Image (tube, rainbow, N blue to C red):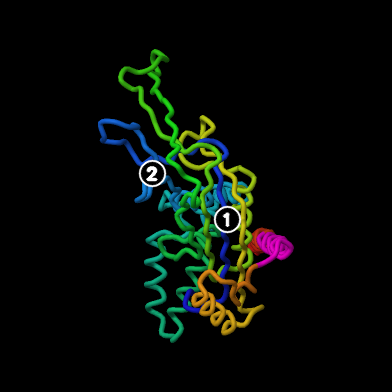
Amino acid sequence: MFDTFTSRLELNGTLTTVTALRIGAGRSTEPIGSDIPVVKDALGHPFIPGSSFKGALRSRLESFLRGIYGNNRHKVADPSNEKEWSITAQEITALKKEHKQKEHKQKDQALTDDILKGTDRISALFGSPWLASKFQVRDLLVQDGAWFGQYQERDGVAIDRDTETAADGKLYNFQVVPPGTPFKVKIIVENAKEWELGLLVLGLSQFEQEQIPLGGGRSRGLGVVKLKIDDFWWFDSQEDDLLTYLQALVNQQQARYAKSDADIYAKSDADIEIYRELWAQALMDKIKGDFINTATLNQL
């Protein structure tokens, strides 16, 4: 499935903290400093793990689709519970055994087709134990020149549920990244279908509208962030010539930061809106098609 290059979407943008952000690195063992410091890179700057961004995005999309499909693991799975995967480990084993016994030359392709057919909507894009993810999110580093060590300290306390007062010895402090801190965002998607890109667009719109908080302390109002997409690069082998695209990439690598032929794949704001609408409509058509197919099966 992934051995043929067909398309690539690259998004570059900025994720800015609207409220203080706390992505903890675990309890500190240092005698001084915060009890719970934020996660930092090798230079001591805060960063947001790409897995945190991607996990929050996946969780929001799963909640949306669960509201549409209900608790149907074949359409929207629960990655934290193997029994609620769209294809469990036992079912994968059974599929492999079934296809191994077949004598046709295309049995590997037939097995792949059955696995893809049984994969839920979210896992088709985000990946699963049996299927590679189609997109990656790089770790979000602070924008160059925007960090001067301006960490903030907040106090916390554990409450004794019986006395409803502060528990003895449970006072602690934690580090946060202040509001207004900009992080660089880079997202790459390859070989995704239009409806899968519709899922991504839907999820990213939630970040653009400050609807997906990140990190800990969200009940306190921490972790509100806002996404702004700055660059949108799109290549589709059905629209563009692959050899021309590859040559443009080589020229860009040779020119490094100079303007190059690869810039023809950078889309304007008008183009971006067209693609957003196209992919969002493809997602709506996919969901409607699922219900039409289900209704047809129920009538048989």
Q: In the picture shown, does residue 53 fall above or below 148?
A: below
Q: Picture coordinates of residue 192 (x, y %)?
A: 56, 68
How busy is the neighbourhood of tag 1: few (under 14 within 10 Å), some, or many (20 plus)? some
Along the line of sight, the residue nearer the viewer: 156 or 290: 156
Q: What residue is disc 1 on?
A: 13
Q: Which residue is drawn at 61% across and 78% down?
A: 237
Majority SS type along the magenta span: helix
Say which of 45 and 6 sits in front: 45
Q: Mark 2 points at which residue?
A: 39
Q: Under tag 2, what secondary structure?
A: loop
Amino acid type at mark 2: Val
Question: For the residue labelled by badge 1, is the local secondary structure a helix, a strand or a loop?
Answer: strand
Q: How many marks?
A: 2
Which dot marks residue 124? none
Query: In the figure, residue 131 lies in which quadrant?
Result: bottom left
Q: Is residue 289 in sight in this rendering?
A: no
* Quarter location, residue 212: top right
Q: What is the magenta range?
A: 267-283
Report the residue at 50% width, 37% height from top. 178
Instruction: Classify 10 Å Cα crowding around label 2: few (below 14), some (14-19), many (20 and above).
Output: some
In the visual, does 131 lie left or right of 252?
left
Q: Is residue 224 magenta?
A: no
Does label 1 or label 2 sit earlier along the sequence?
Answer: 1
Distance between mark 1 and mark 2 Cα atoms:
21 Å
Q: Where is residue 272 in the image (x, y as percent from the top left)?
A: 69, 62
Q: Position of residue 269 (x, y in %)?
A: 71, 61
